[in-house]
Image (tube, rainbow, N blue to C red):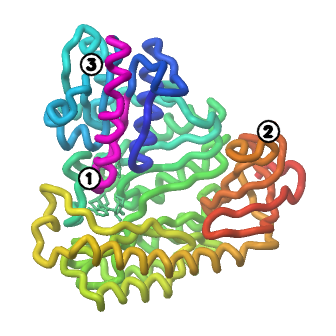
Amino acid sequence: MLTTFGCQMNQADSQRLRGLLNAIGYTETETEDDADLILFNTCCVRQHAEQRLIGRIQSLINHKRRNADLIIGVSGCMAQNMQAGLLELLPLVDLVFGPNDIEELPLLLQRAAIGKTLGSFVGKGAFDGDSADGIILDRPFSAMVNIIRGCTNFCSYCIVPYVRGPEISRPLPELKEYISDLAARGVSEITLLGQNVNAYGRDIGLSEGFAQLLEMIEEIDGIKWVRFMTSHPRDFSTVAIKRIAQLRKVCEQYHLPVQSGSNHVLELMKRGYTREKYLALVDAVREQVSNACLSTDIICGFPGESEKDFIDTLDLVEKVRYESAFMYFYSPRDGTEAAKMPGQLSEEEKKGRLARLIKVQNRISLEESQKLIGHDYDVLVESKAARDENHLVGKMRSGRSVNFPGEQSLIGKYVSVRIEKARNWTLSGTIANSKKES
Ligand code: SAH
Ligand code: SF4
Ligand code: F3S
């Protein structure tokens, strides 16, 4: 059984882990109780993510007692960060490996089976061994595609560059083959991933590489919808926005993490843009892309953030009117610059600001959602609804989920849905016409 924490990078790596395990005879179990291998693909971006994992592993002590052959493995960012320290901290763990050592898993498993505890963190070729037919998808029609691994930005609060290594772009011809193979397998929706997709190609000598890549995908038969994340506001050029806005397949979903609305804090964060430049980018997106759906990430209570700085963030949120936002309070990470900065705020202050921000954003999200009522939108049907057998859940081009009555035979198809009800982020409606292949 494989459990994934953290961001979509980890979900993409899990697609691969499942493929590798399947190739050596493993099948996924429903629960931990009947598993011979329990693997956690982990995240260490905030302390909370780490604590959750530690608790989960400690709770497996009885499983280990009951099944002497049970192997517990930890992969992903926390594994890379703590390396062998994780084996010391959690004696139940048998093997640990980093995000650039996924290919080592079959070998590590063989060794763990003969009773060795071990780790692998060498970080071999970033994309070695990753092929479209070597992955297992949660949904056969939708895949995540890593276009750029690692990150070289070193935002002062962030641990990702230390655990994921430097930015490495996957060459265009390789991606063309990979995505064409996915299309041949029946995949029609892809999500392109990177910590900074706008830097795609920079390390391999491409200029406007990201726009080039999207233009290339536009030509691949079978791919209908293309999403991407995450965009870095510093590297998203207006030229790129104009070129991307012309492409039919690219969905109008723009995740543009701002982190803070205060220039003082943005500078301390080393984000490389100002509030004014960010707002100009938002204007450019809204001008070029009709129906653009904007979302963001925001950190509250960064070291040195004053009440005035925080008000600047609230003000920016009111100005942009994001459809949704991921909001966090600042979590110091060992080894990063910000963890050593003066002016660290108390937990109470950080959480207090986060609560105020969430309140403002929730109101805006609801107001924006309600504007959709009465309109029809194309939806890719993803699955049946968790609570009702006769309902389906689908995703709009904007990335929003919508719940509606329908038959399971529609899963994987594109339909048009009329929105009837809206909460903060979730929507519900009914199919507006029977089948619509877009
Ligand atoms: N590459 C992406 C984000 C990756 S991490 C970008 O540059 O936007 C996802 C989000 O986690 C970040 O956008 C940030 O809002 C949050 N985050 C990262 N480090 C954090 C920390 N130390 N404390 C709180 N939130 C953090
Ligand atoms: Fe972290 Fe910044 Fe890289 Fe995003 S761009 S992963 S926030 S260092
Ligand atoms: Fe977490 Fe690693 Fe992603 S630290 S947010 S899983 S890149």
Res. 139 visible in picture: yes
Disc 2 packing (10 Å; few <14; some 14–19; many ≥20): some
> In this figure, which residue is indicated by the disc labeled 2?
408
The numbered dot on residue 181 is: none
Which residue type does callout 2 highlight? Gln
Which residue type does callout 1 highlight? Val
* The residue stretch that appears in magenta: 39-68
Disc 3 packing (10 Å; few <14; some 14–19; many ≥20): many
The numbered dot on residue 108 is: 3
> In this figure, which residue is indicated by the disc labeled 1?
160
Is the shortest distance between ligand 2 and the CB of mark 1 under 8 Å? yes
Q: Which of disc 1 and disc 3 is earlier in sequence?
A: 3
Quadrant in which the N terminus appears: top left
SS assignment at label 1: helix
SS assignment at label 3: helix
Prevailing secondary structure class for the magenta stretch in the rendered image = helix
Query: Which callout, 1 or 2, points to the residue nearer the camera?
Result: 2
Is the shortest distance between ligand 3 and the CB of mark 2 under 8 Å? no
Camera-nearest residue between 325 and 390: 390
